[in-house]
Structures are given as C-alpha cells and as structure tokens.
Image (cartoon, rainbow, N blue to C red):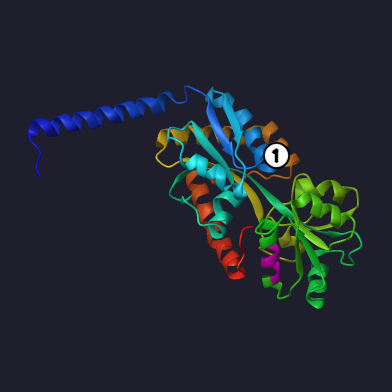
Amino acid sequence: MKLPRRQFLHLAAGAAALRAVSNAQAQSYPTRPITVIVPFPAGGPADTVARILSERMRTTLGQPIIVENVAGANGSLGVGRAVRAPADGYTLIAGTLTTHVLIGALYTLQYDFLNNFKPIALLAEGPLLAVARRTMAANDLNDLLVWLKANPNKASQGTAGVAAIEHIVGILLQKQIGTQFQQVPYRGNAPAMQDLVAGQIDLMFVDATTALAHVQAGRIKAYAVTAKRRLAAAPDIPTVDEAGLPGFYAALWYGLWAPAGTAKDVIAKLNAAAMDALAEPTVRQRLADLGQQTVSRDQQSPDALGAFQKAEIDKWWPIIREAGIKAE
C-alpha cells in the first residue's frame, strides 16, 4: 500500500527523531549506575573477577557499577534475568564458559545466548591444573598418561560435580588417550581437593585458586596447566604442550555481555572501559594472583568474544552430547 506523501514524510520525520534520541542517549551514556549480574554466589571466581573489573571500569565510565548475584541452575537463572532486562546498557551479565556455552547442551533454555546477547569483552581465562595425589608414582604428565592407559578403570578423578567443566575435561582426556577411569562428583572443588590431599582419589583437573597452595606445600603433585602459556602465579608448572599432551586446552573463562538490541555506541563504550581495566597493571596482577590469564588486546573486542564463544560451543557440545551428560 502506497502512503500519501504527507503521511510518509510524517513517519520518516518520526523515525529520524527516534534515531536522534537514540544517538544522543548513546553519546551521553552512562548517566546512572550500571548493574552487572553475576549468575553465581558471592565469593566465587566469577564474582571475584567481575568485582575486580567493575571496580576499575567505574573509573572510566564515571558511574557506579553494582554487582548483583543471581545464582541457581548452573547460572541459567541469572542469565535469564539479564535476557529480560532492557537493552539500554544499564544491565549487563558477567558470564562464563558454563553460562554461555555448557548449559546450552545441558538444558532446554528459554533463550538463545548467541542471539539474545551482544558480546562486550573477554575478561579473563582460568586454565585448569592437572594434579594428582602426593603418593602417585608418576612424576610427570607423560608418566601419568602411561599409568592411566596401563591401568584402565583403576584411577579415580574428583570433579566439582556432574556437568562441571572438570567432569567434561576428564571425559575428553579418556577419549583422547583411549582409556577409562572413574569420575567422582563432589559438591564443588574444595571437598574434592580435601580427598585428593588425603589420598582418597587419584587425580583432578582443577582451578589454580583451589590447587596452588596445596601444590606449593607439597601436599599434591602438579603435572601441567591446560593452556598455551604458563601461569604467572606458578611459572614452574609446564603447559600441556610442554608436558606431552599438546593442544589439550581447557579454561573456565569469563566474559561480559549486554542484552541484544543494546546500541553499538554503548557496546563500544563498555568495551573501551573493559579494555582499559584489563590494561591496568594492578588489575592484571590481581587476576594473575588468582590464576587468571588476560588475553591479548586483539582478543578483547566484542567480535573476538563472539567468535571465541562459537568456537567453544563447537568444541564442548559434541563431547557433552556424545557422553549423554545431563545436568542434575
């Protein structure tokens, strides 16, 4: 249907006015406090990383950043809250590998985290440590792999629970080296680590924050870090490439997203604030002390986070589905 010229011009003027208002809002953003939803309890690694970055980002943005913990269902409750938030840049989600990759293969979700969110920046990566009980005969990763293959179904791996990244990494290792071992789910890494120190289980893939104090005290053995680079907090532990399992990378990483529909200029301001925070030496040191690695600046862009997230989906979803893992 062809509109009368007067009506067409009126609608066009209205659309131009809306664009002008939107552009003005984006240019003045932010004018009030920003909320960052962390979909896990306070005090955990996701919460700690979000608070370290938010503290520095508020200086750049000139507004307070309020961290709100919305825990439950492997993080999906908090993500669902963020999906329903207005796309105005004032509610963000500090997500992880779990919330923005793994749960997509574990649950039937009411949202699509690739299409319902806009990536802002990859904040940090926390690679895992391959560790074993102190009395394990193997003294390096190659020896451990040989022992596991020579003793199928005899070893036990502690995990942070069914469907946790540690569980899935253990399945990947069994598939890659062609052997089996028992996986023992715990309610988090801390109780599993207690049993590893006590010699009740044989090995773990675990975050550095949980493991390093025990490694440094000689209570457990550390064989490798599942990353391309050694950890600044533990430079003596070799990478998996150096230790004999090349390319066996796994990290619990952290990113920042906004609801879909958020203006590009707002995303750009948030990304600039995140990159500014990640360049701050004090922030980088605090993250390193937690066993976190920051990525290069070219990997901190919104497009880089989006591409990385898709690559992680392509890597982990087939492993989860082939193993028939279901969230508890």
Q: Main secondary structure of the magenta part?
A: helix
> Magenta span has 171?
yes
Q: Which residues are magenta?
A: 169-174
Q: Which residue is mark 1?
A: 287
200 up-or-down from 6: above or below: below
Q: Which residue is painted at 44% across and 46% down in the image? A: 116
Q: Which residue is painted at 80% across and 72% down in the image? A: 148
Q: Position of residue 313 (x, y in %)?
A: 54, 58
Q: Which residue is painted at 71% across and 62% down in the image? A: 241
> Quarter of the image containing the C terminus?
bottom right
Q: Is residue 286 visible?
A: yes
> Quarter of the image containing the N terminus?
top left
Helix, strand, or loop for circle 1? helix
Q: Position of residue 288 (x, y in %)?
A: 72, 41
Camera-side residue of 26 and 204: 204
Camera-side residue of 103 and 310: 103
Query: Would residue 198 appear left or right of 124 to someone viewing this image?
Result: right
| Residue that protrudes farthest toward the front in the picture | 328
